[in-house]
Image (tube, grey):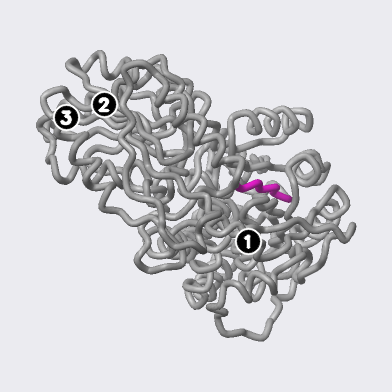
Amino acid sequence: MLETPHATPSAPELDCFALAKQLSGLHFIGGRYVPALSGKNFAVVNPATGAEVAQAAEGDAADVDAAVRDAARAQKEWAKVPARKRGALVHQCAAVIREHQEELARLIALETGKALRTESRVEAGTVADILEFFGGLGSELKGESVPFAPNVLSVTVREPLGVVGAIIPWNVPMLLMTLKVAPALVAGNSVVVKSAEEAPLAVLRICELMNRVLPAGVFNMVSGMGPECGAPLVEHPLVRKVTFTGSVETGKIVAKAASQKLIPVTLELGGKSPMIVFQDCDFAKTVSGALTSMRFTRQGQSCTAASRIYVERPIFQQFVDEMKKAVDAMVMGDPLDEKTDIGTIISEGQFEKVQGFIDEGKKTAGATAHECSAMPKDSALKKGLFIRPVIFTGLDGNSRLVREEIFGPVTVIQPFDDAEKVLAEANDSEYGLAASLWTNNLKVGLDLAHRLEAGLVQINQNLVVQANLSYGGVKSSGLGKEASLEAMLEHFTHKKTIMVNMA
């Protein structure tokens, strides 16, 4: 039987700089920290200052093989643990995470540039919640009795798939990792996570904290580059399921590789989410909702960001003016400063991509770029990857800024006159992840909600991903669902039919 390790508890480390150095150069495999077999590392940079704060282990196929083989050995015993006991252990992990919540918030703010008060603490708080939610679902891993014939007992059972390979992005890595790991573990699988190159530290720390409760080898973490580390994980013969969040382009590569092995894959691939505002809306609530919907405090680095906002013409100009006023009041600065509302872009490459979209929009005839907030004045942040949020007006539906995912603090606001036409514009996209409608006429709202091509439609709110609400897109936004009982059953187990002839 697997033995649960009893690691000596340690007090939370609130000095994120010191913790980052402690985590340098390490994977977590088989219940312990280990360096990359090649000895190679790569830099982890604080995007607010440009300074290197840690090194991350640069994993390759050899590291992946070690992690997957450990996971495969552990999974055989883990699957024998009763489902409710597995759930109870995952639930216990939540308590450990809660003790270290502030530590994780500060660490993720350091490595991603997300503001501590408005973003990082929020994300850190979701990890324990997700673990508690899925931890309570162990008893739901049940089958059915099938009325096949009077003399035949026919039942179905839910069984785990085996080793799950999970590849996560950098924008909300703790949340998205937990949405994959928690249901996979409760369902009886073991997991190997490949972290994002830009944000490997906080998720590594979570892995170690959960391993204080879980049996060794059940949950493993490797870091490295996509082609050298991510691809071997997807292609490994012992990996029986892949779950991936990232770009459409990479998602297609992952799906193609998984198809060669004929294994299931879950993909969450981003979006270009429309927000439709009618003149009968609660105006103040809707403006506030637009700030949340655009994820300005995260520099717009969200796949559900409302980067296309359609406003009914009678309130269009007022809406633009109030939006700009509200974003102007937000403070951009040091992510670890409690006064900061808006942090930084994650990396130089992402910075250049976003700036390229902004420059293109400014050069477009008839367009107006409403630049908001203000750059930080602290000289220590002069090399930081800060971009002022921009609200564009005057762009038409053919603009790249309207059609492509920018993943930055850029939104386009356009007026509309007709509900049917704005519905057609909202649906005229390769993406279909999320959408929101803002109106006090629920008949109109519900009618459009049913016809919007999106996996998640909200009326008069735009919350981030929540445990117990099915989440996933249509069209190029991906395959499969996350965050729900349905996701655990359909994406982390297979159904076996057992028949007994009693004649």
Disc 2 element: strand
Q: Where does the image place residue 485, in percent across and percent down from the top left? A: 47, 49
Q: Which residue is mark 3?
A: 317
Helix, strand or loop at mark 1:
loop
Tag 3: amino acid: Gln
Neighbourhood count class around disc 3 (C-alpha, 10 Å): few under 14, some 14–19, many 20 upward: some
Between circles 2 and 3, the one closer to the viewer is 3
* Tag of residue 51: 1
Mostly what secondary structure, the magenta segment? strand
Q: Nearer the viewer, residue 5 or 152?
A: 5
Cα separation between marks 1 and 3: 42 Å
Between marks 2 and 1, how big is the CA–CA gap? 40 Å
Residue 136 in sight from this viewpoint? no
How many numbered discs sit on the rendered protein? 3
Q: Earlier in the sequence, mark 2 or mark 3?
A: 2
In this figure, which residue is indicated by the disc labeled 2? Answer: 310
